[in-house]
């Protein structure tokens, strides 16, 4: 089951990376205001995505509901992993996540609280804390350029604008490969830095489709995304540890991210039992 617990970073990375980038990773232009009259032309789908930059003001934080499902298909077997939870971010270093992951018929409740100095984790009653590393901060400088999209369409109904997009898989792989790989590929096999595990996993993004919905307040209210990834892992053979076998797998991830009260300030409160969390230092082999 530990491997399935390690799928969480990959799923969350895919959901949050696409959501953050889709809803305005492009920084605001703080230069002189143009004196040219505004264009009367209707904004394009990409311009609408850029226009919601204000909804990602991390000084106010974010309140998200996440519903994700990942299906892993290999020869003769399909495994489905689900995740539902809530993500509260007060600023770039303070956040709280409460979620339940389902895999192989089991439910795994988990909560994570970070206050900037420590990360507190409660997994099924096992409560530990560790110094917060800089690389644990969520990416906040992601940017999607128009050239990354294969297609973009903007529709509007009842005051809700919807952008439907397909992204270039190669561009997504280049942009988010490290985020996806940090959890998804690591859960499927070893890496090149881990001797004795083969050549390490290889990932190819096959398709990425996304829908973003903006409310009448011009803020982002929902992002749905589907990601199709082909993975091949060469690792030690169970029958003969001296040889390696190639395992090929198809991973399909579907994610819905709902923004609660977008644009409103968010306050993150710590768990009431922080004194019960014990110091923890993770060794390299703890999650093998």
Image: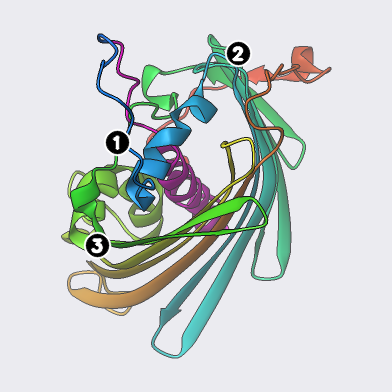
| Gap in angstroms between the C-alphas marked 3 and 1 | 16 Å
Quarter occupied by residue 25: top left
Q: Position of residue 153 (x, y in %)?
A: 39, 62
Q: Position of residue 114 (x, y in %)?
A: 59, 20
Magenta segment, principal secondary structure? helix
- Say whether disc 1 or disc 2 marks the residue closer to the N-terminus: 2
Task: Answer few, some or many: residues within 10 Å of disc 1's Cα (few below 14, many 20 plus, some between 14 and 19).
Answer: some
| Kind of element beneath mark 2 | loop
Q: Position of residue 199 (x, y in %)?
A: 16, 60
| Kind of element beneath mark 3 | helix
Residue 194 seen in the figure: no
Residue nearest the viewer, comparing 169 with 30: 30
- Say whether disc 3 or disc 1 marks the residue closer to the N-terminus: 1
Q: Nearer the viewer, mark 3 or mark 1?
A: 1
| Kind of element beneath mark 1 | loop
User: Circle 1 sits on which residue?
Assistant: 143
| Gap in angstroms between the C-alphas marked 1 and 2 | 26 Å
Which residues make up the magenta segment?
A: 1-30
Residue found 48% across the figure and 85% down from its top: 77
């Amino acid at each position: 089951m530990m491997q399935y617990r390690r799928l969480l970073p990959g799923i969350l990375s895919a959901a949050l990376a696409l959501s953050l980038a889709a809803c305005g990773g492009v920084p605001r232009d703080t230069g002189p205001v143009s004196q040219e009259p505004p264009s009367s032309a209707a904004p394009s789908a990409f311009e609408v995505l850029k226009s919601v930059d204000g909804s990602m003001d991390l000084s106010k934080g974010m309140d998200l509901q996440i519903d994700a499902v990942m299906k892993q298909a290999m020869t003769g077997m399909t495994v489905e992993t689900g995740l539902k939870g809530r993500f509260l971010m007060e600023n770039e270093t303070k956040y709280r996540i409460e979620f339940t992951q389902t895999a192989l018929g089991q439910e795994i409740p988990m909560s994570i609280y970070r206050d900037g100095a420590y990360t507190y984790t409660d997994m099924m009653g096992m409560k530990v804390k560790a110094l917060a590393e800089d690389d644990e901060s969520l990416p906040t400088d992601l940017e999607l350029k128009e050239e990354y999209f294969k297609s973009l369409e903007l529709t509007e109904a009842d005051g809700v604008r919807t952008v439907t997009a397909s992204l270039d898989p190669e561009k997504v792989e280049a942009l988010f490969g490290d985020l996806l790989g940090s959890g998804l590929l690591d859960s499927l096999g070893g890496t090149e830095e881990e001797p004795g595990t083969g050549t390490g996993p290889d990932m190819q993004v096959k398709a990425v489709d996304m829908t973003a919905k903006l409310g009448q307040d011009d803020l982002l209210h929902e992002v749905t995304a589907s990601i199709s990834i082909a993975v091949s892992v060469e690792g030690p053979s169970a029958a003969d540890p001296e040889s390696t076998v190639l395992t090929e797998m198809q991973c399909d991830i579907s994610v819905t991210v709902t923004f609660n009260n977008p644009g409103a300030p968010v306050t993150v409160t710590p768990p009431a039992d922080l004194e019960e969390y014990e110091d923890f230092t993770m060794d390299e082999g703890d999650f093998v």
